Image (spheres, rainbow, N blue to C red):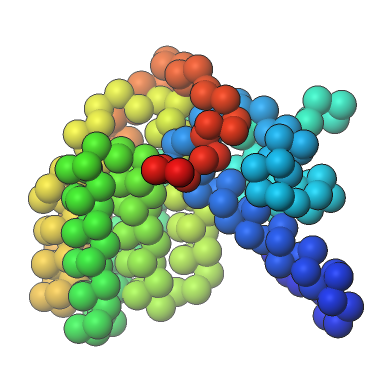
Amino acid sequence: MNKPHSTQPRTLHRLAASDRVAEALSLAIHEHRLSPGTKLGEDEIGEVYGVSRTIVRTALQSLAHIQLVEMHRNRGAFVAQPSQQEAREVFEARELLEPRTAHMAAARATAADIDTLRAHIAEEHAAMAAGDRGRALHLSGLFHIEIARIAGQTTIAGFVDELIARSSLIIALYWRRESALCESHAHHDLIEAIAGRDGPSAEDLMRSHLVDLHSALDLHRSAAPARSLKEALQKPGS
């Protein structure tokens, strides 16, 4: 969200607070603590985070801009529910863009970049081992975003970021084969190809990985009933 150049302390404080709320809600959506279709009551969210309805409304509008939230007149805000057609389009778009970014990443990756990617999959596997599927999914998405960043294509990385955010909602609605999320070899093999500067292999591996993820969707499946909003927004262990 672009911030105006106002220097008024109250305005800056309100913007900073709305950004924090938007980030917290986004994480809850990505980690599947908030299910697609969940109503996002302004009063309830404000109570959870100790902020005003104005701040919550600003946060929800910023999430609507990136299609994580849907705003309905006279009904309020809801976690977005991508249609079956949108689900197909998102994964088809990823299959077009991400293999190429993997190829480019292999030509540009530094030793520090490879270390970052390895750290991502270590956290991802730890989350899976702990039974935290939502966090594992979020980390998996960050892994793909990191590859797009390494590729050095800012515009494409922005598209990938948005597509992965929408993928999180699609997986929450239509997932049928959880094993495809973090199959131990998929991300590891991608890292090895990128570290070895093998662009063609990185491209092929990314394409195969995304096709596998796409095939794990059941486009006739409905989302599970959502938990209460307050319960979903509580941090694990709190």
Please state, as top left, top right, bottom left or bottom right, where the N terminus lies in the image.
Answer: bottom right
Specify the quadrant that holds the C terminus. Answer: top left
Residue 171 visible, this orientation: yes
Q: Position of residue 172 (x, y in %)?
A: 43, 31
Instruction: Identify which residue, 231 or 140, lies in the foreground.
Output: 231
Q: Nearer the viewer, residue 233 or 169?
A: 233
Please tell me how many numbered marks the rendered image carries.
0
Percent position of residue 78, x then y: 67, 32
Can residue 85 be seen here? The reply is no
Q: Is residue 69 above or below residue 231?
A: below
| Residue at figure coordinates x 12%, y 58% from the top left | 189
Q: On the rendered structure, is 189 left or right of 112? A: left
Residue drawn at point x = 77 percent, y = 36 percent: 43
Q: Residue at x 78, y 69 (%)?
A: 13
The part of the image, by quadrant, that contains residue 219 is top left
Q: Position of residue 157 (x, y in %)?
A: 46, 66
The quarter of the displayed image where residue 205 is located: bottom left
